[in-house]
Amino acid sequence: MTKSALQIARAAYQPKLPKALKGAVALEEGKATQSVADQEEIKKLFPNTYGMPVVTFNSSDKKVQLPAINVGVILSGGQAPGGHNVISGLFDGIKSLNKDCKLYGFLGGPSGLIDHKYIELTSGIIDEYRNTGGFDIIGSGRTKLEEQSQFDSGIEICNKLGIKALVIIGGDDSNTNACVLAEYYLQKKCGIQVIGCPKTIDGDLKNDMIETSFGFDTACKVYSEVIGNIMRDANSAKKYWHFIKLMGRSASHIALECGLQTQPNICIVSEEVEAKKMTLSQIVNNIAETVAARAEKGNNFGVVLIPEGLIEFIPEMKVLIAELNDLLAKESDVKAAVAKLNPNSAAVYASLPESIAKQLTLERDPHGNVQVSLIETEKLLIEMVKKRLADMKAAGTFKGKFSGLGHFFGYEGRCAAPSNFDADYCYSLGVNAVQLIASSKTGYMSLIRNTTANAENWIAGGVPITMMMNMERRNGMMKPVIRKALVELTGAPFKKLADNRADWAINTSYVYPGPIQYFGPSEVCDQPTKTLMLEIGAK
């Protein structure tokens, strides 16, 4: 395999660890915990793992020899920078406790556990993937672990390979599955521990205990670099408005973080749109008014950041989509279905550009629903803003020029080489997971806190997954799930945006973050996200 100069240099990087994980550890247990909501229901569903304490690891001078056990690891869901370092941390962690321990990787995600597809991860394999992006070391998948037959198949292969602990690296759904699996294995008394690790670039797996999910830092820095490049181009050419859609269907953390890093003219936050019950027309008018205000100053250019899931947060669009799903399930004739829309939805539908309207009625998923993720929101807004500005020009309230360009930044950030923060954080999560295993814990998520401090002062430990759970309706049934973290409109990161956006809208206040730096001063190479610094600074 041919490697770039950077790959070779990064392979030699030794991730930083919290001082508590550099040698022997002592376990400190906190008080009993409870779920964030629906306590009685969650306790009833998880009688063996509910109420466990948060645990913290401290340095100790008593070295513990771990019996030679084998550990299995699964990558679940979409890719996120740093996954390979979690696995490297697991490997180094178990080998430091007993050189005869083995690490097995299940191939292609949770399905590898069910179908008994695996490889032993040796030092030769691990060393090829240290500090690299992607999940290609063992692959990932989105199979849900929900059925007893799947759990039992997992027991069978774990017993065959002598695996005493499984580590599931994934987002909220994957860690919910990990919790269900831990509960089942305790119920069956099969002696298999289950530990989760918080992964998702979307940033929506966080709470009072989990400060950030891994991959968010790197992805936002990658997107912010490219946004900054586009801003520099916009400020040079001075003739284009760039509409940039960013990943994050369920929450707007990425758009908000990139907004804080680059200071665009407009940064839309879906949660605010929903809270204020904003219409599509209001969003379009707000953008058009900013375009006109900048044109008054001779600036016929700008940058707009758009969360991927915006459409689903606009109340009137949510109603329209739900109505279309119901009508088209019963009516094969599109025109006939559209004719049956209620007056409000019909008006919204009529306001849409023809291409978007057609997409809402023609492209369905296997369940018969509109494929909202495929809607090109950036192009929708460009077309509607263009139309609104034409009306304003006719009325004499807009005298500038408008030319819109659309972009979508998504997959570019998911497999980037991890930043120093993510490389260190992920490696620490892996080593820490080993300590949870050595402490006979199960149903826990690997926990690294105090992450705005130097890595040496990070706090290591574990949090019961049941502590993060509530009951939500999924596919028509109430199910226990980890509560997603949406952007808090009362939180410090959003307030920072809100306090500055009037200035950023009119003035050209762009910040150009540049590419991720791996070598050099700590203030350049090791900085966490703006979101993390603001959130922890506000506590």
Image (cartoon, helix red, strand yellow):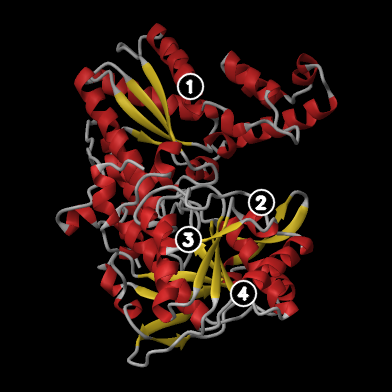
Residue type (three-letter) at the residue carrying disc 2: Thr
Position of residue 375 measured from the top left corner of the image (x, y, whole percent)? 57, 27
Residue type (three-letter) at the residue carrying disc 1: Lys
- Measured in 3D between alpha carbons, the distance from the residue under mark 4 to the one under mark 1, in whole angstroms, is 54 Å
Q: Which of marks 2 and 1 is in front?
A: 2
Q: Which of marks 2 and 1 is nearer the N terminus?
A: 2
Q: Name the residue under label 2.
A: 143
Q: Which of marks 3 and 2 is nearer the N terminus?
A: 2
Position of residue 449 measured from the top left corner of the image (x, y, whole percent)? 38, 70
Q: Name the residue under label 3.
A: 206
Q: Which of marks 3 and 4 is nearer the N terminus?
A: 4
- The answer to which image quadrant residue 52 occupies is bottom right
**Circles 4, 1 touching at the beta carbon (< 8 Å):** no
At horizontal 70% and vertical 69% (from top left) the residue drawn is 155
Position of residue 104 measured from the top left corner of the image (x, y, whole percent)? 54, 64
Q: Which of marks 3 and 4 is in front?
A: 4
- Judge whether 313 appears above or below 420 on screen: above
Q: Nearer the viewer, mark 4 or mark 1?
A: 4
Q: Earlier in the sequence, mark 2 or mark 4?
A: 2
- Measured in 3D between alpha carbons, the distance from the residue under mark 3 to the one under mark 1, in whole angstroms, is 31 Å
Q: Secondary structure under badge 3?
A: loop
> Which label is found at residue 162?
4
Residue type (three-letter) at the residue carrying disc 4: Gly
Q: Secondary structure under badge 1?
A: helix
Residue, far right:
330
- Measured in 3D between alpha carbons, the distance from the residue under mark 2 to the one under mark 1, in whole angstroms, is 33 Å
Q: Secondary structure under badge 4?
A: loop
Q: Which of marks 2 and 4 is in front?
A: 4
